[in-house]
Image (cartoon, helix red, strand yellow):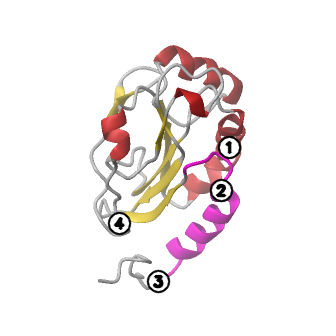
């Protein structure tokens, strides 16, 4: 059973190993950015994820230009993640080995090996999170299937508009 983080809540500290060495706390922006986009993908077995991550790569410069750092992560092993990223060739950091426990913290759905082809272990379904400068969730999107994810171009347009405003808006969906 997973809990679900609400919009406006702090994103949990989640440290994962990176494919190019080292490790990263997914909740912390890097390289002079003040916001963070975390894309959780299903893993090597998912061709829709490969396409989504390639689209993310094509939009990365635009996302970076508005101060948002990008990272992707899956529950896959290093070998499986590396095989998939050989197709994507991302310039953004890619983490691997996200534990199911850590995947449940932000409310990701977990599927078993029967929910995909060439799957070796239970895995996290897709999620997209944008963490603002205060470390809180500005955007939360989780899905239990790979074909129901937000358009990255739409997210970029929306975030460009939001980040361009002189007035700070409250986080949508966080009214108590």
Sequence-wise first label, 3 or 2: 2
Of residues 155 and 141, which is closer to you in this image?
A: 141
Of residues 168 and 128, which is closer to you in this image?
A: 128
Query: Residue 27 at x, y = what percent?
Result: 34, 48
Sequence-wise first label, 1 or 4: 4
Q: Which residues are magenta?
A: 144-166
**Left or right: 64, with 166 as reference point:** right
Q: Is residue 162 magenta?
A: yes
The residue sitting at 34% across, 69% down in the picture is: 8
Sequence-wise first label, 1 or 3: 1
The residue sitting at 35% across, 58% down in the picture is: 4
Seen in the picture, residue 47 relative to 64 is either above or below; the reply is: above
Residues under numbered marks 1 and 3 in contact, where contact means CB atoms less than 8 Å apart: no
**Left or right: 98, with 118 as reference point:** left
Q: CA distance from mark 3 to mark 2?
A: 24 Å
Q: Residues within 10 Å of mark 2 (few under 14, many from 20)?
A: some
Sequence-wise first label, 4 or 3: 4
Seen in the picture, residue 41 relative to 83 is either above or below; the reply is: below
Q: Is residue 26 visible?
A: no
The residue sitting at 40% across, 76% down in the picture is: 171
Labels 1, 4: front one: 4
Q: Residues within 10 Å of mark 4 (few under 14, many from 20)?
A: some
Q: Can you tell which mark lies on residue 166? A: 3
Tag 1 residue: 52
Q: Can you tell which mark lies on residue 6? A: 4
Q: Is residue 120 visible?
A: yes
The residue sitting at 64% across, 55% down in the picture is: 62
**Left or right: 76, with 27 as reference point:** right
The outermost residue toward the front is 114
Tag 2 residue: 152
């Amino acid at each position: 059973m997973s809990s679900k983080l609400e919009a406006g809540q702090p994103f949990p500290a989640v440290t994962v190993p990176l494919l190019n060495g080292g490790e990263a706390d997914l909740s912390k922006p890097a390289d002079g950015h003040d916001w963070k986009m975390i894309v959780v993908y299903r893993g090597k077995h998912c061709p829709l994820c490969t396409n989504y991550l390639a689209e993310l790569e094509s939009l990365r410069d635009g996302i970076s230009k508005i101060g948002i750092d990008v990272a992707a992560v899956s529950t896959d092993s290093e070998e499986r993640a590396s095989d998939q990223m050989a197709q994507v060739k991302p310039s953004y950091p890619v983490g691997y080995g996200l534990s199911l426990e850590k995947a449940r913290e932000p409310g990701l759905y977990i599927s078993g090996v029967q929910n995909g082809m060439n799957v070796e272990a239970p895995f996290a379904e897709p999620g997209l999170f944008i963490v603002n400068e205060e470390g809180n969730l500005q955007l939360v999107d989780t899905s239990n299937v790979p074909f129901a994810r937000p358009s990255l171009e739409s997210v970029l347009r929306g975030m460009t508009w939001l980040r361009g405003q002189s007035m700070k808006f409250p986080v949508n969906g966080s009214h108590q």
